Amino acid sequence: MESPIDAFFREVLDDRTSVANQLEEIHGLAWEVMDSALLDLCRLRVAMLLDCDSELEVSNSDLDSEKIASLSEWSSSSLFNESEKACLRFTEEFIVDVSSIPDSSAFAVRECLGEEGFVNFVNALLVVEQRMRLQIVWRKIGEEVSV
Amino acid sequence: MTRSQRVTSSHFDNKFREALSLWQEEVVQLDLVDPVTTEVVRLRCADHHDCYT
């Protein structure tokens, strides 16, 4: 079944169906190659940082509600394991300035996920981030056009 | 800043990589933005993402 966010992209992209199809394809693959709970944590953190309400309302895994409530304090929380903390640190740096992610953050993720897992994580994070930024911009444009 | 090489192999999950390439190809082929602007944006993004492919 098509999600509300997929439907939003279909509506905006209109007759550019091949672009919408590709976007759905890469989004689906991002969740296939990654541990869904781990990627969902990072997705929610991106949504918090970018203030993307439509993504904050969605759950793509069975994340513990206490964990979600503590997500902004992940670095000092005992609820998050080493792998989650490494990925969340990388995620925050990726969102703020993708060109300035230090080696230490990248190597910490690689250490936890392995080389292939690290590559898949970065690609999946790219998809999640791009999809979210597109939503934010297009919803904003939609609001302004409809006023 | 300087960056070390972070992965030693590029032979990972070809299906995902290929899908990402197809998505990017579809996007740059959209014709609502003129080709020069599209290329300037593409090069700026590649530089920002440290992407030499």
Image (spheres, rainbow, N blue to C red):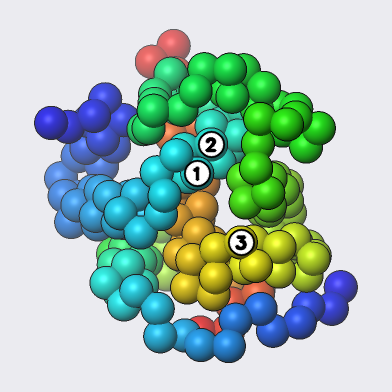
Q: Are marks 2 and 1 in contact (CB under 8 Å)?
A: yes
Viewer-proximal residue, A79 or A141? A79
Viewer-proximal residue, A119 or B51? A119
Task: Locate residue A18, reporting x and y percent.
Answer: 18, 56
* Residue behind mark 1: A38
> Can I make out residue A132 in this image?
no
Q: Amino acid at mark 1?
A: Leu
Task: Locate residue A102, reporting x and y percent.
Answer: 80, 65
Judging from the image, what secondary structure is the residue with disc 1 in?
A: helix
Q: Nearer the viewer, mark 1 or mark 3?
A: 3
Vertical placement of residue A102 versus A64, above or below? below
- As drawn, the label of residue A112 is 3
Judging from the image, what secondary structure is the residue with disc 2 in?
A: helix
Q: Nearer the viewer, mark 3 or mark 2?
A: 3
Judging from the image, what secondary structure is the residue with disc 3 in?
A: helix
Mark 1 or mark 3, earlier in chain: 1
Mark 3 or mark 2, earlier in chain: 2
Q: Amino acid at mark 3?
A: Cys
Q: Residue at x 40, y 85 (%)?
A: B11
- Which chain's residue wears label 1? A
* Residue behind mark 2: A41
Marks 2 and 1, how far apart in space? 5 Å
Q: Residue at x 23, y 29 (%)?
A: A3
